[in-house]
Image: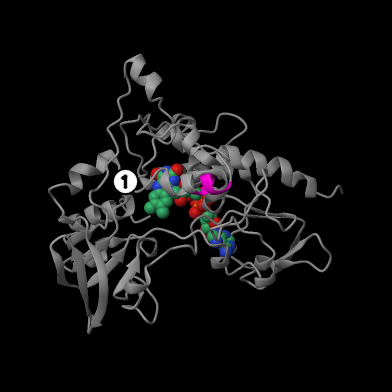
């Protein structure tokens, strides 16, 4: 997340899973920080600080290393894990919890602008490439997408004095509704508050292992679609130009300029910008995890109609001892897996089941 971004989830929906009180509010109280309410968007750095304190308190031993490879060990079951400093470890079980890393998606018509690879210094980048958007001050930037990443990046770019416009293919931009902490009981009954909001999503629709097969995948695609946080609206609406029903149909590099062809209700038109920021989300594709050996990946059965792994009720793939959690588990367990609020269910299931791989000394 770029500097200056806020979490979209409310404080209640941002607690990491702990066996006792270990929520965001507990840590803030413990460290003398003011209480957060539903009406206080959480700055990214507050969440990072909470995560670090949580790790010190509950996790203990953490090795700061990048995993370069995971392959089957010489005797099955078991794995060999290669680190980028050359060390090799053996493990009876591996839990892949790498989040959205490596899964960024840029449509191929935009990728043509960066044959050498997309990134902050190229004509096109993905929102995940950035930790500071102020580098684009004074430049013409097109942001592609209509979700939180697009809208918040556009606000930050505008505030950094870039000339930004947002190109949204949907007919309109959706915004979250302002929380109402003291709603009357009939309203609370009809639309109960939950970690994923109350904007027409029933707990079941965002819940765990809801439905089966095709209906589960449909739910994954439909529930919790792109929208902007309520607190962001004033920084975008009437401030940053947003074109809806607008698709980029062609993009060409011309020196240091990106020349775009846009198609909208009024026909096509051209636009020249210095940079395109793709806020086009992530693809849940297990093959994008290059650190998993190809043979291992081939052994992972997929959810029909997707490239995400099929998982047991304890998040184990079809390769015994290989678990996958986080976003890649969402097609099986529901959209909640994309959020912090999903960790309580996932962590408990994985920890209970993975304990069977621990060999007694
Ligand atoms: C812009 C943005 C805003 C978001 N806002 C919210 C929000 O408001 N609320 C919410 O609940 N969720 C939000 N999310 C979703 C958020 O990413 C997840 O909820 C949460 O971070 C997922 O946790 P995770 O542990 O699965 O993955 P991450 O938090 O992404 O953690 C993955 C970890 O794996 C490590 N890793 C990756 N590859 C390797 C490797 N090869 N070797 C070693 N380590 C590796 C990474 O360094 C990282 O530490 C947001 C996501 C984005 C992109």
Sort mark 1 into few (<14), some (14-19) or many (20+) by Cα contacts within 10 Å. some
Q: Quadrant of the N terminus?
A: bottom left
Residue drawn where x is 57% and y is 37% of the image: 344
Give the tally of numbered discs.
1
Q: Residue furthest bottom?
A: 255
Q: Is residue 214 above or below residue 176?
A: below
- Where residue 261 appears, as percent x and y from the top left, is 20, 72
Relative depth, front residue between 161 and 326: 326
Side of 242 relative to 102 (left or right): left
Callout 1: SS: loop
Side of 214 relative to 171 (left or right): right
- Where residue 282 appears, as percent x and y from the top left, is 44, 59
Q: Is residue 71 magenta?
A: no
The answer to whether residue 47 is seen in the rendering is no
Relative depth, front residue between 32 and 118: 118
Q: Residue furthest front?
A: 214
- Where residue 338 appears, as percent x and y from the top left, is 48, 47
Q: Residue furthest top?
A: 185
Colouring chosen for the image of the structure: one colour
Relative depth, front residue between 250 and 50: 250
Question: Main structural element of the magenta stretch: helix, strand or loop?
Answer: helix
Span shown in magenta: 213-217
The answer to whether residue 277 is seen in the rendering is yes
Q: Is residue 198 above or below residue 75?
A: above
Residue drawn where x is 32% and y is 34% of the image: 40
Quarter of the image where one finds residue 246: bottom left
Relative depth, front residue between 221 and 117: 221
Residue drawn where x is 29% and y is 65% of the image: 277
Mark 1 lies on residue: 227
Side of 40 relative to 307 (left or right): left
Q: Is residue 190 above or below residue 121?
A: above
């Amino acid at each position: 997340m770029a500097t200056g971004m806020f979490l979209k989830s409310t404080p209640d929906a941002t607690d990491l899973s702990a066996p006792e009180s270990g929520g965001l509010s507990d840590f803030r109280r413990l460290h003398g920080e003011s209480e957060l309410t539903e009406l206080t968007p959480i700055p990214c750095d507050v969440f990072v600080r909470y995560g670090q304190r949580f790790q010190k308190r509950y996790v203990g031993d953490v090795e700061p290393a990048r995993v370069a490879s995971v392959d089957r060990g010489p005797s099955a079951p078991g794995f060999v894990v290669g680190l980028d400093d050359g060390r090799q470890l053996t493990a009876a079980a591996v839990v892949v919890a790498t989040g959205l890393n490596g899964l960024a998606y840029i449509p191929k018509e935009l990728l043509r602008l960066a044959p050498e690879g997309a990134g902050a210094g190229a004509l096109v980048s993905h929102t995940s490439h950035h930790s500071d958007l102020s580098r684009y001050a004074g430049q013409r930037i097109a942001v592609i997408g209509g979700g939180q990443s697009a809208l918040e990046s556009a606000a930050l770019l505008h505030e950094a004095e870039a000339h930004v416009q947002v190109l949204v293919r949907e007919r309109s931009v959706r915004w979250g509704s302002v929380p109402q902490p003291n709603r009357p009981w009939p309203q609370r009954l009809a639309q109960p508050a939950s970690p994923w909001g109350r904007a027409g999503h029933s707990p079941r629709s965002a819940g765990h292992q809801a439905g089966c097969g095709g209906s589960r995948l449909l739910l994954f695609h439909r529930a919790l679609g792109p929208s902007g946080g309520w607190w962001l609206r004033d920084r975008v609406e009437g401030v940053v130009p947003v074109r809806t029903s607008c698709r980029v149909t062609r993009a060409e590099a011309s020196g240091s300029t990106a020349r775009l062809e846009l198609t909208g209700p009024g026909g096509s038109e051209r636009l020249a910008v210095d940079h395109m920021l793709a806020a086009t989300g992530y693809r849940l594709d297990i093959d994008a995890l290059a650190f998993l050996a190809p043979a291992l990946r081939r052994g992972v059965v997929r959810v029909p109609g997707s490239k995400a792994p099929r998982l047991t009720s304890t998040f184990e793939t079809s390769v015994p001892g290989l678990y996958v959690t986080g976003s890649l588990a969402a097609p099986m367990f529901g959209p909640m897996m994309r959020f912090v609020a999903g960790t309580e269910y996932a962590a408990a299931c994985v920890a209970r089941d993975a304990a069977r791989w621990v060999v007694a000394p």
